[in-house]
Amino acid sequence: MPDSNTIIPAKEYTTLNLGPTHPATHGIFQNVLKMDGEIIIEAEPTIGYIHRSFEKLAERRPFYQITPITDRLNYCSSPINNMGWHMTVEKLAGIEIPKRVQYLRVIIMELSRISDHIICNSVIGVDSGAMTGFLYIFQWREKIYEIFEELCGARLTTNIGRIGGLERDFSPVAWQKLNDFLADFPAGLKEFDDLLVRNRIFMDRTIKCCPISAEMALDYGFTGPNLRAAGVDYDVRVINPYSSYDEFEFEVPIGTNGDTYDRFMVRDEEMWQSLSIIRQAIAKLDRLEDKTSIHADVPEFYLPPKEDVYNTMEGLIWHFKIVMGETTIPKGEVYHCVEGGNGELGFYLVSDGGRTPYRLHFRRPCFIYYQAYQEMVKGSMLSDAILTMSSMNVIAGELDA
Amino acid sequence: MSELNNEFVIEHLKVKFGDAILSAEVLYDFLTVTVTNKEIFNVIQFLKSDETINCHFLTTMCGLHYPDAKESFGMMYQLHNMPDNYRIRLKVFSSDADPIFKSLTVLWPSANWMEREAYDFFGFKFEGHPNLRRILNMDSLEGWPMRKEFPLEDPFRMDKDDKMFGR
C-alpha cells in the first residue's frame, strides 16, 4: 500500500526520431514518434526530403521531355507512369493508337506492376524477419528489368515509349526473355507464396496489424491495392478502361479488413492476374493481322526514324519541329488516370496551345494516402508501424514529386 | 447505373445554387463547373451528401494561376462517385492577391495534405484547416513556387526564351 507520502511520477513519454534515413523506412521519410514504451502514442510525419518540383519543371518543358520526369514518380513501376503520361497527351490531341501498340503497352504495364508488387511484398517479408523470400523473388525483378532493357535500353527510370506509340518494336530477344519469364515466374512466385502465405510467424505478425476500414480508407483518399485490401473493388483498369483493358478478363482481388496481411494478399493475387493479362495480350497479338505497327500516324508528335531524319527533307523538318517544340498543340484541359502500382495515378493537364503544359498536376496516390499513416499506427507497436509503412507501398519519389 | 449524368447534375446545381454557378462546360468528357468562392464549400458539401449524386470521393485538388485574368488565382477540385463511376471537376477563382478558400478538411481528412500542398506552392489560405503550413518545401523558403512569376531557374538565361521561337 503506498502511503500518502509516495509521489506517483507523472507519465513520461519518449520521443523517438524514426528516419529520415533509417534502413527500416525504405526511403526518406521522417516520423517523430511519441512513445509509451513500445506503443506509439502519436506520430508526426515530415515529408518532402526529395522534392524536386516536378510540376514547376513541367511548365518549362516540351511534352516529350516530361516523360523522364514521370519515371521518377513511382520509380518501382516507371513504365506505368510513362504510359499514363503518353495517354494523357494522346487524349488531349485525340490520337487513336493502333490495337497492337495498346496490347504491347498492356504487356509492359503489367510487367511493371509485377515488379512493383514483388518489391513491396518481399519487403513486407523482410520487415517481418523473412529475408529468404526477398532474396529469391528479387531475381525475377531482375528478369523483368532485363526485358525493359531490351525494350528501351534502361532498367529503372525507363522513359519507355513515345507519345503516339512505342519507340521500338519488341525484338526477338525481348520476346524470348518475355516467354522465358512467363514460363518460369509462376514457379518462383509459387515458391514465394509457399514461404509466406500460410507461414504461422508471418500471419501472426501481419494479421490485424494496423487495419483500416473501408469508410476510413475512402475518406483518406486510398486507391489501388490498399483500398482493395479494405474491401472496395475500385480499379481504374475496370472502371475507366484505357489501352483496351476492357477486352481483358481478370479478377479484382479484394480483402476484408484492410490489415497488412490483406494488403499483402491483394498484391500477391494481382501478380497472378497480371500474368494472366500478359498471356491474354500475347494471344490477342497473335490473332491480330497487324504485326508491325508500333505507333499511330501522327508526324507532329512521333519522332521520325533516324534514317529518315538524315536522308529525307520531310523527316528532318518533323524532327526539328518536334524537338524545338514547333508543332501545334491543342488547347484544352484533360484528366487521365491509370492504375499505378499503388493506386490511381492521375494527370491533370491544362494546355494553352504553347510548347509546354500551362499547368500539369500529378495525382500521386501515395501522397494522398500516406497522411492516414499517423492514424493507422496510433496505439500499435513500433515494429507494426514499420511493417505497415512497407505494406502501404509508399514510394518516396512519388510522395515528394 | 442510375440516371446520373451531366444534365442532371447541372440542373440540380442551378436549382439549388442559382447564380453561384458561374459556368458549366464539358471538357474532354469531363463536366467542369465554376462556382463562386462564397458557395464552393456548400456546393461540394451538397455534391457529397446528395443521395443521387453521391460524389463521396475526393480524387484530387490543385491550385491554378492565370496572371492575366482578372480573377487570377483558383483551385480545382475533382470528385468521384465510384458506384456510378461519375466524375465532376469544380473550379473556384479569386481576385485577391492572397486568396482565402474554405477548407474541405471537415468533409474529407484527405484534403489536409492536398490543401497544405496548395498553400505551400501558391500561398492560398484555407479557412478552417487544422495545420496549414508548408509540406514539401522547406519552411524558410520565400515566395510561392508555383505562381507564374516565381522563376524556375536563372531568369537571365536566353536559350529557352519564347522570343527565340517567334512567339
Image: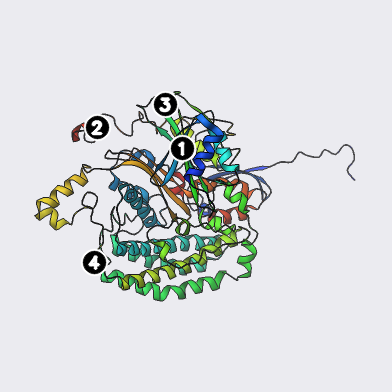
Front of the two marks 1 and 3: 1
Picture residue at 47% right of the left edge, 62% below the top: A117
What element does badge 4 sit on?
A: loop
Q: Which residue is mark 1?
A: B33
Q: Nearer the viewer, residue B101 or A44?
A: B101
Q: Find the distance from the CA under tag 2 to the CA under tag 3.
A: 30 Å
Q: In the rendered view, does B14 fall on the left or right side of A157?
A: right
Marks 2 & 1 on one chain: yes
User: Would you say the residues marked 2 and 4 are in contact, meaning their CB atoms lie under 8 Å apart?
Assistant: no
Q: Earlier in the sequence, mark 1 or mark 3?
A: 1
Q: Earlier in the sequence, mark 2 or mark 3?
A: 3
Q: Which amino acid type is marked by label 2?
A: Arg
In the drawing, what numbered circle is on residue A159? none
Picture coordinates of residue A75, whole percent (x, y): 40, 54
In the drawing, what numbered circle is on residue A292? 4
Q: Which amino acid type is marked by label 4?
A: Thr
Q: Is residue A149 visible?
A: no
Q: Find the distance from the CA under tag 1 to the CA under tag 3.
A: 16 Å
Q: Nearer the viewer, residue A72 or B146?
A: B146
Marks 1 & 3 on one chain: yes
Q: Earlier in the sequence, mark 2 or mark 1?
A: 1
Q: Which residue is mark 2?
A: B157
Picture coordinates of residue B148, whole percent (x, y): 36, 31
The image shows residue A28, relative to residue B23, as above or below, that is below
What element does badge 1 sit on?
A: strand
